[in-house]
Amino acid sequence: MSEVLLEAEDIRIRFAKRSGRKNQVVRAVDGLSFAVDPGETFGLVGESGSGKSTAGNAAIGLQELFSGTVRYRGEPMPVPGSARWRDLRRQLQVVFQDPFSSLNPRWTIRQALSEPLKLHGLASAEERDGAIARLLEQVGLGAELAARYPAALSGGQRQRVCIARALAVQPELIVCDEITSALDVSTQAQIISLLQDLKAQTQVALIFISHDLGLVRGVADRIGVMYLGRFVETGETGKIFARPLHPYTIALLHAVPVPDPEREAARKHQPLHGEIPDPADPPSGCYFRTRCPYATDICAAEAPAFEEMEDGHRVACHHVREIEQGVRRS
Amino acid sequence: MSFLPRSPSAIFLSTVGLLAVVAAVFPQWLTPYDPTGIDVTALLAAPSWRHPFGTDELGADVLARVIYGVRLELAIALGSVVLAGVVAIPCGLLAGYLGGWVDWVLTLVADSILSFPIVLFAVLIVASLGASVATLIGVLGFVFVPRIFRLVRGQTQVIRATGFVRAARAMGVRTPTILVRHILPNILGPLLVIVPQLMAIAVLIEAGLSFVGLGVQPPQISWGSLLLVSKNYYIAAAWYPLAVGTVTTLAAAALVFGGDLAAAAVNPSRRRV
Ligand SMILES: Nc1ncnc2c1ncn2[C@@H]1O[C@H](COP(=O)(O)OP(=O)(O)OP(=O)(O)O)[C@@H](O)[C@H]1O
Ligand SMILES: [Mg+2]
């Protein structure tokens, strides 16, 4: 299983945006490359508007690319709607953020879970109820829920049903797009632990999208930190948390509370100042420079290279050496 | 079970609807008179206990004629709305779901129809096809197409972006299935709400067009054709056109009112599922 499952190579995605009388181009994804191995969880982190959802959709062939390629098991993503593309729907699944609109309000849970089973011929009519019960059990729900409508379920229960619906086709990869952000904290933790169990049981790979680094830490094997459609830092989760090198990652990490209240109180906070720039009109050079405490003239002049610092740990920052030293000293 | 009337609006609508259906199918249950019965002893008789709306120029009971007119009225109103729906719902679903040039073209066509004056259009069609019930249904249906189209298109655009539609697409569900099984059932509420509103418009336009001779032709009985005949007697028997006109207006008002009630019932956080 050393083969790469999914590979995105320098993908770019643009949207037309009209603001007032001007027609602008939003570079939602602006040159991303990443790979996901079978069974691996890749975390995509960044603020709202950084292009995480767009990148996630593109990874599973739900979003047309402006340029670049997405390869699934070495083959380029087929054209949406084609027979090949339709076959791939069994391998690549997605769960969305809002559990309240993710289930058809007029369908029972049984109907919702039957759809993928019927569509891909995965269970005969007699086997279907059993398969649905097993799916519900797999996500920690009782089989009696099958007869209910979504309105009778809590947010957490609905999100579990959505996960079950994605699992129904036994996919190789599920994009989880902010699947916990509409839920309260304790439900979030339950969903995260469910994902951890599923990873262990099913060998499914995940692209876990979140704006919350703390949450990503719990599930992701590797992390890509996005800012305005680009990666600023990628690497193994452990390494990024142990030694974040990009000023943006450092700022995001500072926003994650430490569980120990004494240590939390003693921490020096380095909050992010200002707003994320308009993606239709990004700054010159390094996109992060307008909010970066290390920014100098070179940051405005040219975009930093995406440098490999150590095995798999890449950072796009002109001042990464200074930061590295600083981090070592403290 | 959710179809049983519970709210006042549902009770009102179903009462009006039931009355209309009975009048259309079993008008003899509602009046003892023959709408075409001639009574030379009571020509243009004034309203009385026996003839609440009086009698017409041939002595027939006007109330009976109004009641027998419901059949054609209902056929025209429902027929035109169904005709429009058959065309507009698929177009609205496609335009709203696919977007792009499909949406552009269909919306352009719909807007062109909307901007065309109804009466002028009716004159053109009737002049070339002749005045008949079928022509009237065709004209009304055509006029209703853009109204239903816009509603369906707008609702489809909203639902297209929801998670369950995106999930279905990600799962590989084909577009026609998504439109029919996921989107259509979820826009049925707003769609049903505009039906009484369109029917009210149909009743009024029928009356107007028939009145000027472009719609239902006497001796066929519709409220418009009754109006057309009755206006000849507005001096000798003012209550005659007045009665027909009042019924027409009240029926349209009831439909509009019913539509508003239904809209209020459907709109806010109704979702009782
Ligand atoms: N269909 C679209 N049409 C036009 N612009 C879009 C579209 N989808 C996304 N965008 C724009 O692309 C940028 C990236 O959006 P995206 O939803 O991928 O960000 P995100 O990181 O997922 O943010 P969030 O946390 O808010 O979900 C945003 O500026 C957004 O406005
Ligand atoms: Mg998003």
Image (cartoon, coloured by chain):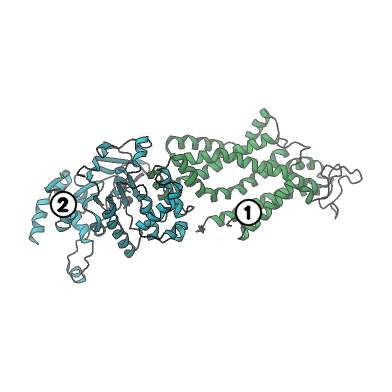
Chain colours: A cyan, B green
Q: Residue at the location (20% across, 68% down)? A: A264
Q: Is residue B219 left or right of residue A155?
A: right
Residue A320 point in image, percent of width and height: 12, 51
Q: Residue furthest bottom?
A: A262
Of the pair A318 and B134, the residue shown nearer to us: B134
Q: Residue at the location (9% across, 51% down)? A: A321
Mark 2: secondary structure: loop
Give the amino acid type for the residue marked by disc 1 in the picture: Gly
Q: Is residue B34 left or right of residue A95?
A: right
The reply to whether the residue tagged 2 has its Cβ within 8 angstroms of ligand 1 is: no
Residue A115 point in image, percent of width and height: 43, 47
Give the residue pinned by disc 2.
Answer: A295
Q: Is residue B41 visible?
A: yes
Mark 1: secondary structure: helix
Give the amino acid type for the residue marked by disc 2 in the picture: Ala
Residue A48 point in image, percent of width and height: 30, 53
Q: Residue furthest right?
A: B41
- Residue A252 falls in image quadrant: bottom left
